[in-house]
Amino acid sequence: MTDMHSNDGPYLSVEDLVVHFPTADGIVKATDGLSFTLGRGKTIGVVGESGSGKSVSSSAILGLHRGSSAQVSGRIVLGGTDLLMLSDEEMRLRRGKEVSMIFQDPLSAMHPYYTVGNQIAEAYLVHNDVSKKAARARTLEMLERVGIPQPDRRIDDYPHQFSGGMRQRAMIAMGLINDPGLIIADEPTTALDVTVQAQILDLLQDLQREFNSAIIIITHDLGVVAEMADDVLVMYAGRAVEYGPTKDVLTHPQMPYTWGLLSSVPDVQGDTNAALIPIPGNPPSLLNPPTGCAFHPRCVHRSKVPADLCTTTLPELLPGSQGPGHTKRCHLADPDELYRTEILPEIMPDLIVED
Amino acid sequence: MEELVAEAHAPSQLNPDAAPILEVENLQMYFPVRSHGLVRRVVGQVQAVDGVSFQLGAGSSLGLVGESGCGKSTTGRAITRLYEPTGGAIRFEGKDIARISPKNLKPIRRDIQMIFQDPYTSLNPRHTVGTIVGAPLEIHNLVPKDKVLPRVQEILEVVGLNPEHYNRYPHEFSGGQRQRIGIARALMLQPKLLVADEPVSALDVSIQAQVVNLLQDVQKEFGIAFLFIAHDLAIVRHFCPEIAVMYLGKIVEIADRETLYSRPHHPYTQALLSAVPDVRQAAVGGRRERIRLTGDVPSPINPPSGCRFRTRCSLAKEICAKVEPPLLQVGARHKVACHFPGELGHAPQTPVTTGICGVDAQGNTVAGQTADIQLNAPGYDTTWLDLATGQRTGA
């Protein structure tokens, strides 16, 4: 957080981003007042359940809601320009060049009728005034860079001829061919096996170092966040509920929803007798979100907050006891103490001795 | 529900003396590859499962893990007899069901049920929950028609659904609730063995834990044996006291939970475990030290000779290409299929399998020695090869 601000302002700054979808049943508040910053060469991990607004927020950065009925407001400042103020044509020129996206499922994100090489070269031709031959040479170079074996033979293959891991590599090649400053990776490894996932994450990190890009990685896997991200943003019902440096948030989480996410996945190294404590209930409807804190119907610590505050008042995203960089949206008075005495002994009993 | 939450959902413990309910021996499942054209000749075989053997105790659970295409789901489907196996035996309560006729299969289906991965496609959208969950009772003609509904409601309550919702359709439920419907259907006939094929991987993280806890509760309550198929190593570790790791149609390592996760002996298991991203890494920062596997899994149509993992293995030597490593017992409940088994960084310099396979250290056949044929038997022996001394020892 600190070194990010030491440069002349963050590379990407999202301020009070709102994405609402009017529907016949009412307004779906997919993202409701989201703010975060990201510097070049840094990674932010966005976590949350399906329907928490992770993907909607990032597609808003890419301007993918233009032309739909979505109501987008707020500011998305990338390298000094507010992307929401741009015309469609100006945005089109930036899309793929300054911001690009790596999708979750490369099989459905690629066109089955075109060869992989043609699809990657297209991304280059759109933004660069070069011959097809030059684009092909650049495509070969990128395929080689992302580790596709025998790229000169594979360049004319169709997506279905690639394995899952290779397809994701080709997607990364497509996303990085114009050397974008910001890469949005939407669940880039969810569809992949663990050993392939490790290869792809390694590749993303190497490329980030090489091109000094900023990465937004959207995932539900806190393990991926722990290993990849500098900052983490936990989203629930369209809002940030906890935001801060990864190390801080994952070792001293201060919001019951983050506790729930941590306690509901077993740990591959932890105690085998550690209990899995699920978050009760289901994610809320964004059409009709709960009053007050959106998490209150599923929160087991609600009784520790006086005067029904949770059901009536939406908590502000405020710094907790871990310093100004780590903010959380919760009414609990002393979440650190609660986490240490009640949550940690249940989910990671082997870590208790440290205190 | 409150009581269920309060009660700790303890992971099931290993009972080494439990009588085996399921014994799979040398199971093979090949799918023919046909040529294009008018005469669709068989031009090859996809060796999806090739010689898998294991034992599952009554009321226990065995985890099958591996990457996509390793044959774990095919194994599950062969055991439920959704496929007819190409070879080998599947002994359920001592009776071989691998070759049994469809007519004789029906009573066995009562005892072996399956939970599917995708709760969206495994429920008929045009049937109500009551029809879906009650179907097994009607198919097997177990209770009179007017008694079906009370049973359905009873079982819906067991899996944590509102029994009054029997008249609703699957689309009215969330993913986690749909998976509960699938579990209710599988429990309806009070099976002795449940094959759960990736039962939670399609669900959100917070819902996964709810379903895993439910499965643990029903296992404890009804004493059901589970074959738990998943690619998520952490979930399998949490659920199963015993785990088998598969690679390209074969079991490469099988052991109890503690041994497999803390002292894996097969280089593939070690690579697999080191690849799992870990939340605890946040305290340290950066990436975890990991073993990098290069390339992709080879094609099961034309698998590598000898050890199937050798093309991606850092330990591979000449013998690995020539001789297939047997699934060798190296501990009381620990078998590994590798010529150079050992803890990470402590692999032996010479192959430990030469005597058993009847070959020399380069993998050439030695005259007069024959291979031990008993090596692909399910279950465990009372004696095993001690890797430290090279001698056979017992408990």
Image (tube, coloured by chain):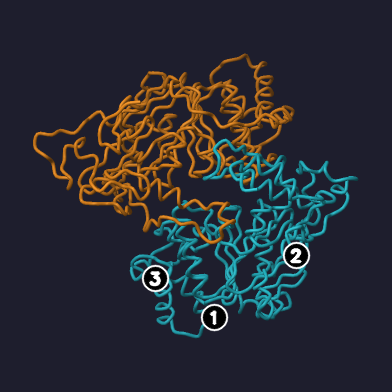
Q: Chain of mark 1?
A: A
Q: Position of residue B135 (x, y in %)?
A: 59, 25
The CA distance from mark 2 to mark 1 is: 41 Å
- Left or right: A40 with respect to B368? right
Q: Which of the two residues, B342 or B51, is positioned nearer the viewer here?
A: B342
Tell me how far mark 3 sits from mark 1, CA to CA: 21 Å
The residue depicted at 58 percent of the width and 52 percent of the height is A221
Labels 2 and 1 positioned on one and the same chain: yes
Quadrant of the snapshot with the N terminus of chain B: top right
What residue type is disc 3 on? Answer: Glu
Q: Are the residues at dot 2 and dot 1 in contact (C-beta closer than 8 Å)?
A: no
First of labels 2, 1 by sequence position = 1
Eye-nearest disc, 3 or 1: 3
For residue A127, which numbered disc appears in the image? 1
Say which label, 3 or 1, has the lower sequence index: 1
Q: Would you say residue B109 is visible in this rendering? A: yes
Colour of chain B in the rendered structure image: orange
Q: Label 2 sits on what residue type?
A: Pro
Q: Nearer the viewer, residue B367 or B108?
A: B367
Q: Nearer the viewer, mark 2 or mark 1?
A: 2
Residue B287 left/right relative to A19 = left
Give the cyan chain's letter. Answer: A
Q: Quadrant of residue A33?
A: bottom right
Q: Residues within 10 Å of mark 3 (few under 14, many from 20)?
A: some
Residue indicated by mark 2 = A324
Q: Earlier in the sequence, mark 2 or mark 3?
A: 3
Identify the chain of the residue marked 3, using the numbered disc in the image.
Answer: A
* Extreme-left residue of the structure: B367
Q: Which residue is mark 3?
A: A144
Judged from the image, the secondary structure of the residue bearing numbered disc 1 is helix
